[in-house]
Image: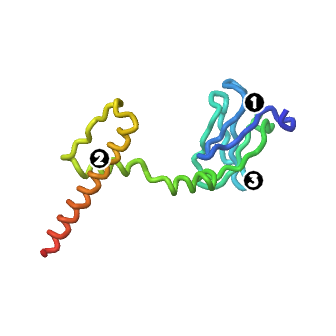
């Protein structure tokens, strides 16, 4: 159907390969780098696959009997995902940031907020976080000025 090839292959934003068809299909992934085959892997048990190479490579499916007959379109995989995905990762702060702040303040207890407050609970959480940040900044300031010897 797809230009005479029974399977379709594509790459998601994270650089993971996907294929059409079903588990049990007698196909295998082929990874090529600069025209040379660097990996052949059975694809019968999985509809997705991530190759761990750090360089841009080409991927497609072959039949798992001869490992030579192409069974899908060819796709080019950039290891870091699409440029849009790279940009999103750059702009999104790491989720560990909030945890690191809490680790610095072991004496503070974050109150558990009930869902009764509805929308207000979000603001309450923000206030708690702001208080934690403020106390973290003031405590690190006092440590710093104390260390300088006045």
- The residue to which callout 2 is attached is 128
- The residue to which callout 1 is attached is 65
In screen coordinates, is 100 left or right of 33? Answer: left
Q: Element type at marker 1?
A: loop
Q: Tag 1: Cα neighbours inside 10 Å, few (<14), some, or many (≥20)?
A: few
Residue 35, numbered circle: 3
In screen coordinates, is 126 left or right of 80? Answer: left
The residue that appears at 68% across and 24% down in the rendered structure is 24
1 or 3: tag closer to the N-terminus: 3
Q: Residue furthest top?
A: 24
Q: Element type at marker 3?
A: loop
The residue that appears at 73% across and 46% down in the rendered structure is 75
Observer-nearest of 23 and 84: 84
Q: Element type at marker 2?
A: helix
2 or 3: tag closer to the N-terminus: 3
Q: Quadrant of the C terminus?
A: bottom left
Residue mark closest to the camera, 2 vs 1 = 2
Place of residue 112 in the rendered image (x, y in percent of width and height, measured from the top left): 28, 35
């Amino acid at each position: 159907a797809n230009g005479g090839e029974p399977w379709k292959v594509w790459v998601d934003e994270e650089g993971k390969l996907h294929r059409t068809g079903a588990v049990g299909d007698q196909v295998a992934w082929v990874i090529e780098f600069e025209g040379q085959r660097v990996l052949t892997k059975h694809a019968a048990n999985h509809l997705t696959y991530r190759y761990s190479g750090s360089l841009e490579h080409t991927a497609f499916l072959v039949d798992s009997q001869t490992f030579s007959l192409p069974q899908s379109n060819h796709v080019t995989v950039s290891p870091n995902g699409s440029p849009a995905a790279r940009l999103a990762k750059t702009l999104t702060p790491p989720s560990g940031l909030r945890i690191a702040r809490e680790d610095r303040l072991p004496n503070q207890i974050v109150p558990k907020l009930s869902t009764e407050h509805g929308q207000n609970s979000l603001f309450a959480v923000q206030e708690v976080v702001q208080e934690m940040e403020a106390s973290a900044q003031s405590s690190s300031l006092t440590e710093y000025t104390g260390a300088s010897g006045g």
